[in-house]
Amino acid sequence: MTDTIDRITVAPIPARHWTELGRNAYTPEGLGETRTEWLIRACTTSGAEGITNARHTVAAEGGSVTRLVADLREVFLGRPVNSLLRFSNGHAVAAGSEVRQALSSWGWMDILAVDLVSRSRGQSIAALLGERRRDRIPAYESTTYFQDLLHPQRGLAEVIGHARRGFAHGFRQFKIKVGRGGRAMTPTAGLRRDIDVVLGIRDALGPDVDLMVDANFGYDHQPDNLADFIRETSPARLTWLEEMITASVEGYRTLRELQAAHCPETLLVAGEVDGNPPSGAFVDLIEQQLIDGYQPDIVRIGLLRWTQLEGRLAEKSILPIPHNFGNGRFGLIAGLALATSLDSWVSLEDERIRPNVYADDELTLVNGAYRAPDGPGLGIRVDDDAYARIGAPNEVVIRT
Ligand SMILES: [Mg+2]
């Protein structure tokens, strides 16, 4: 009998960071502590259940729960699971023809389709897409925002204390938000604080942790400060410089020269703003190898799209380093599945959302890494008791 999707639920799930986050270079205020996952559970006539986080549709311009329900009805409800994906040599290689447009527009739909198909076949996502590439997934702490501005009386010490707590929680890789001189402080004071934060965290955590920085374009239109930042933080041996400036060939040529002169081992990475990868300036940055790592978002792009992108990046020796901030607890789950599937991998962005609605007790960071999931599908299911408390009271149920 054909396995068909016959019941879908939609529910908003609170997703709380481990602590309150400050602002970054472009947010006008701090990020606070709580975000929202829009959990989709799609069930089939054989009893398989696929999950995803559809927050991009709800948060999009013109987005709403009504729009989300209409999209789910049109794309998934009543559809046979075996029509969702196209296979070649036993592996899923693309979306099925009837859902191709939808799955390439919405990465969360791509993930739901991949999860449903792999669960209904009893396979892991890595096996569905190719093969299991690794057993451990290194992850980086990605919540070191402008904590100093959240608690100005403690200033620099507050940011360093934040990173120290992350180290105590098991992280060995840390990404630090910089770019204070764009909008959060004066350019001169912001530059000084950025440098002090980077050198201070290196001093506090020692030589063996990996440190990255992300400026969210906070060094745009400040060429002298950009050069000073790169020169003065070179003793910290940063693993990567992320979005120091807005993507352009001219800007990245300058950045490449600075990197070559002061920190040749440090990677230049960007791409989280690319919603249709690769597009715009990123086509040229990839072709001309002006970046070393490319960062479209995992849930915005989807798993099929990411595996398709990987080959194109490999031709240019550019590493996949996907963005995964804002995707909630689900983002960690989806990110681990993607990380297990891709040929090359650097590190998974961890925004450190507390356990909420998933039966994910085994998601424990050990010595800076998570265990790669075994499946079936994403390898994690929704916890029924938790869902009854925090999901069911707000859910919409869609049936055939
Ligand atoms: Mg970023």
Image (cartoon, rainbow, N blue to C red):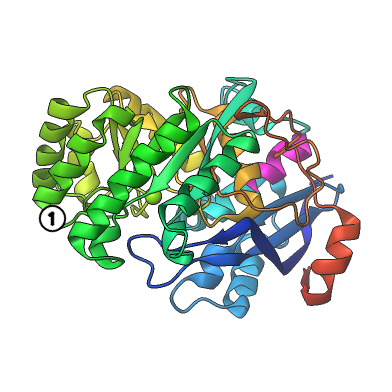
Mark 1 C-beta to ligand 1 under 8 Å: no
Expressed as whole percent of the image width and height from the top left, the position of residue 213 reads 35, 42
On whether residue 45 falls in the magenta region, the answer is no
- Residue in the picture at 87% in, 49% down: 47
Does 129 sit left or right of 104 as displayed?
Answer: right
Q: Mark 1 points at which residue?
A: 222
Is residue 149 depicted above or below 45 in this figure?
Answer: below
Q: Judge whether 361 appears above or below 235 on screen.
A: below
Residue at x-position 68% and y-position 43%: 115
Q: In this view, does 91 lie to the left or right of 285?
A: right
Q: Quadrant of the C terminus?
A: bottom right
For residue 262, side relative to residue 321 (left or right): left
Residue 133 percent across, percent down from the top left:
57, 20
Residue occupying the point 56% across, 55% down:
327
Q: Which residue is drawn at 76% across and 34% down?
A: 376
Tag 1: amino acid: Gln
Query: Is residue 400 shown above or below 143?
Result: below
Indicate yes or no whether the magenta region holds residue 114: yes
Taking 196 as reference, is 249 left or right? left
- Give the residues in magenta: 113-121
